[in-house]
Image (cartoon, rainbow, N blue to C red):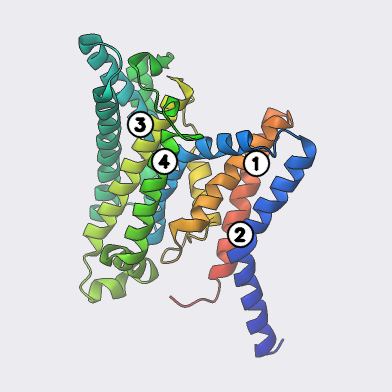
Amino acid sequence: MNETTQRKLHISWNRLYEYGVYVIFLLMVVVFAFSNPNFFTIKNAILIVEQSSPLMLGVCGMAFVLMLGGIDISAGANMYLSAVTSALVMQKFTAANGVGGIMTYIIGISTALLVGAAIGLINGCFIVKLKMVPFIMTLAMTSVLTGIGLILTKAELLPVRASGFQPSSIRVGPVSMVVVIVLVFTVVFHYLLKYTVYGRQLTAQGNNQEAARKLGIRTERNAIIAYVICGAMAGFGGVLSAGQVGALSSNFAKGNEFDIIPAAVLGGISLFGGKGSIFPGAVIGIVLVNTITNGLTMMAANPYVYTIVRGIIIFIAVMLDSINYKGELR
């Protein structure tokens, strides 16, 4: 195989990786539309977007860690513990001051953000300062956070809406307030990652950590901030998701990291770091994941099929990322 042919093949793979998520998305829409006439409706499209919104916050945060070349698989457990803590704080507040009101929302969201950011800070400090492997550190954190959440709830169902926290009930036109909030955060974080000094430094670190350090970039500080952002957004997404479902079970947000990470990678954010953006790829990625789940539900598919499909999505995301990375100098 001559050099010209190799170059053409490399370009073809790059294009497949770049536009593959859109092709898959369109194919899934066509398949599900033919399988159930209720799938291809405005009402169902709005439902998919609303279900995707809390996880999109997780994708926004995960983008910063992935851009760095790291990973945070404790995102799902973070969502769980942040939502549990927030719900318990809101219960205490409403018991003393009555149900509902803007203060319930402020306290609930602020608590989730603080808890999530604290978890991210712990992850970041252990990974950066103690040189722990991100996968191992966040894997251990997953177990710790889940255990704390189960202790706090005694593994019982914890109501959320009883405190008056119902963000999905507040509508802005045809969509809930959650969608609007997430849209604003998505735009802000896309700009932060793509066009600010911090975002460019993070990209440089992901491409070459040692070179970035020699250039005077404060790599440790940037890495810790990235994990704090990731943790805070997981916490925020957790409490918004809890408001949607109305109550927290012991399985709440379990495995959400396996939706968030593949969605980000399908959207073009590389697991190897230094490449990608939040909009539009990562947005399409999480909508694609939820579209497949929604379509399978409407087809009344076997519940075990969901696990198989999730595995296939992860495989495709990692495969395309690996193929695109091979032979590329960074």
Question: Residue at label 2?
Answer: 319
Instruction: Examine the rendering and report whether any part of residue 313 can be seen.
Output: yes
In which image quadrant can residue 137 be found? top left
Question: Residue at label 3?
Answer: 145
Residue 194, x across and y down, in percent: 37, 64
Tell me the amino acid under the disc marked 1: Ile
Residue positioned most to the right? 34
Q: Residue at x 42, y 13 (%)?
A: 156
In which image quadrant can residue 158 be found? top left
Question: Residue at label 1?
Answer: 292
Q: Secondary structure at mark 2?
A: helix
Closer to the observer: label 4 or label 3? 4
Q: Residues within 10 Å of mark 3 (few under 14, many from 20)?
A: many
Q: Secondary structure at mark 1?
A: helix
Report, in whole angstroms, how far the alpha carbon at label 4 lies from the one at label 2. Answer: 33 Å
Q: Residue at x 33, y 16 (%)?
A: 163
Residue positioned most to the front? 173
The mark nearer the N terminus, 3 or 2, is 3
**Pointers 3 and 2 in contact (CB under 8 A)?**
no
Closer to the observer: label 1 or label 4? 4
Closer to the observer: label 2 or label 1? 1
| Side of 268 relative to 14 (left or right) | left
Residue 168, x across and y down, in percent: 44, 28
